[in-house]
């Protein structure tokens, strides 16, 4: 328990009250009035290293509006004291018998707000078995001048595929620890809920997909207060999946894929690949689907659409189609995706020509999750050995592509020896969030990093929790983090009602689109020798 400071009183009644409170303190902390409970800096011996803390909130840059970065001290001791200070404002002192340090919310907010652009110093003291206090080298963090976009939406799923029926879509206020549900798949027939997305960080324009389960396969569309259930299947395409909103807000680019998974008996965890993968655009206002033969051919796989911030180009990942009849090799391991783009005019629904942006295959790599910075100058992307599903590729790392110069650099210090995967930019382009398995190689956590606009990222830090041991206690995967500028206001009950509704808006295929007369028929996959 944190210590309680007791002030002396003059009157007998006040003295009685203080005595009662003192007894309470004895029960709560096990001591009262000991001079050694709070260290005197002059009498402490120096420990010439940083303290071991978990999570690792050291040598990083923090948003001035982030929730307190509570942590556990991984050092043996009988008592602990933490002192937090900056150039201006009231300092924070925490006395604790437990190594778990929880920072007062209001004091933390005041200190960070007053010191934007300045340093934050955290000093840890530990009392040893001889009742002597040791002082570690102070942790020095930076406080950025720019706030982080206030809310984050993510899906939480178990890391084991057998429990796919336990999926939850949450929103988190990053200024606090408040987490609220948007959708539970338990309430929607145990379906798969996936691929949530927002138009221009707007919480009032959202979509996500539902697959199988009791409510069937369709898309839930939240658009300016209305909630719709949309069937995006047509005679041309299967149900849609990976998505990107056009900056104009009326058009969404989708991929539609026939996804296969391979589960290895030994060695690797699993692999994901497509047998069919094409792109289309869905007009929210006209409820029509359109495409171009240039991005929907059987000869190539197109996936992960992403609009440029000016809305002129659709970027996407593309690889040659698989030859499932070639038994001489594992075809899915030859799937190396390049980054392409094609111009598009929503007003006339006209397409330009495909242009290569990054030929990752010539580097022996495969590209995925190409995400534009809001200013359009940078693309943050994943590169792995093969596939378009970096979540299962431990060698997957984040790279930064400068759109102006076409230079590609590894986005250190973001990377680790484990898989780095899905990522997103904050509204002002100064912060990123990304998924990583670095903590234990199995669960996926969310990490944040500051971007200075000149290609440099700060050391990433994990999503703060009220209980700093929560990440270790919970066995779960954080999936598809997306920033929004405020909370989703539609209540989960309205989304559940729409999911079960028999009123389904059927998407219409544009009359100019050639109906696909044949689909690739792929035999059941068998392991190659």
Image: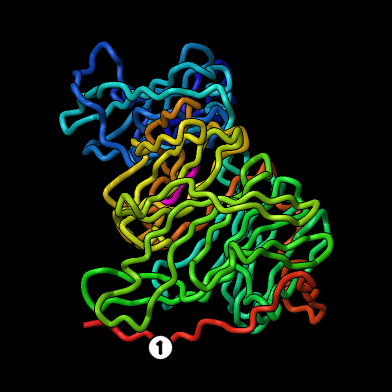
* Colour scheme shown: rainbow
Residue 87: x and y in percent read 47, 11
Q: Is residue 400 above or below residue 86?
A: below
Query: Looking at the magenta stretch, what is its main secondary structure?
Result: strand
Q: Quadrant of the C terminus?
A: bottom left
Q: Is residue 119 above or below residue 81?
A: above
Q: Is residue 263 above or below residue 68?
A: below
Residue 210: x and y in percent read 63, 73
**Camera-nearest residue between 81 and 263:** 263
The residue depicted at 39 percent of the width and 58 percent of the height is 390
**Camera-nearest residue between 246 and 103:** 246
Residue 455 figure quarter? top left
The residue depicted at 44 percent of the width and 77 percent of the height is 260
Q: Quadrant of the N terminus?
A: top left
What is the magenta range? Answer: 432-436
Regarding residue 153, the answer to whether it shows in the image is no
Decide whether residue 435 is among the magenta residues.
Answer: yes
Look at the numbered disc 1 and give the secondary structure of its residue.
loop
Residue 338: x and y in percent read 43, 54
The residue depicted at 53 percent of the width and 62 percent of the height is 303
The residue depicted at 79 percent of the width and 72 percent of the height is 511
Decide whether residue 391 is among the magenta residues.
Answer: no
The furthest residue to the left: 130
Residue position marked by numbered label 1 in the rendering: 524
């Amino acid at each position: 328990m944190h210590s309680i400071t007791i002030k002396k009183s003059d009157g007998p009644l006040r003295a009685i009250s203080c005595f009662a409170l003192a007894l309470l303190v004895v029960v709560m902390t096990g001591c009262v009035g000991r001079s050694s409970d709070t260290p005197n800096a002059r009498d402490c011996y120096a420990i010439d290293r940083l303290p071991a803390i978990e999570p690792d909130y050291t040598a990083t840059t923090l948003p001035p509006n982030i929730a307190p970065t509570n942590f556990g001290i991984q050092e043996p001791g009988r008592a602990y004291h933490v002192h937090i200070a900056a150039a201006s404002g009231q300092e924070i002192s925490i006395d604790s018998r437990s190594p778990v340090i929880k920072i007062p919310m209001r004091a933390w907010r005041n200190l960070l707000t007053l010191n934007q652009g300045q340093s934050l110093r955290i000093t840890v003291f530990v009392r040893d078995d001889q009742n002597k206090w040791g002082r570690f080298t102070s942790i020095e963090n930076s406080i950025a001048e720019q706030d982080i976009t206030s809310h984050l939406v993510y899906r939480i799923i178990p890391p084991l595929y057998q429990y796919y029926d336990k999926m939850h879509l949450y929103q988190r206020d990053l200024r606090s620890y408040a987490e609220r549900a948007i959708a539970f798949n338990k309430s929607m027939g145990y379906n798969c809920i996936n691929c949530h997305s927002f138009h221009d960080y707007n919480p009032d324009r959202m979509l996500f997909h539902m697959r199988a389960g009791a409510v069937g396969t369709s898309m839930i569309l939240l658009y300016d207060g209305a909630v719709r259930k949309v069937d995006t299947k047509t005679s041309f395409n299967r149900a849609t999946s990976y998505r990107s909103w056009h900056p104009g807000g009326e058009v969404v680019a989708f991929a539609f894929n026939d996804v296969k998974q391979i589960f290895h008996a030994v060695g690797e965890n699993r692999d994901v690949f497509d047998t069919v993968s094409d792109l289309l655009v869905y007009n929210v206002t006209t409820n029509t689907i359109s495409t171009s033969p240039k991005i929907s051919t059987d000869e190539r796989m197109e996936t992960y659409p992403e609009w440029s911030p000016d809305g002129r180009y659709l970027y996407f990942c593309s690889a040659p189609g698989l030859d499932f009849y070639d038994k001489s090799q594992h075809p899915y391991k030859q799937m190396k995706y390049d980054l392409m783009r094609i111009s598009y005019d929503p007003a006339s629904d006209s397409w330009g020509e495909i242009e290569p942006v990054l030929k990752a295959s010539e580097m022996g790599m495969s590209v995925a999750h190409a995400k534009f910075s809001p200013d359009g100058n940078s693309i943050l992307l994943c590169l792995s050995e093969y596939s378009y599903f970096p979540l299962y590729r431990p060698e997957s790392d984040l790279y930064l592509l400068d759109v102006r110069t076409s230079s590609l650099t590894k986005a250190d210090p973001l990377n680790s020896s484990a898989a780095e995967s899905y990522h997103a930019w904050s509204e002002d382009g100064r912060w990123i969030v990304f998924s990583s398995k670095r903590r234990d190689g199995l669960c996926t956590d969310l990490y944040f990093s500051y971007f200075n606009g000149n290609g440099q990222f700060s050391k990433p830090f994990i999503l703060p929790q009220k209980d700093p041991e929560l990440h270790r206690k919970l066995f779960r995967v954080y999936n598809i983090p997306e920033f929004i500028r405020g909370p989703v206001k539609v209540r989960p009950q309205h989304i559940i009602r729409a999911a079960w509704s028999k009123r389904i808006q059927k998407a219409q295929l544009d009359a100019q689109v050639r109906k696909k007369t044949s689909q690739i028929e792929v035999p059941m996959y068998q392991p190659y020798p």
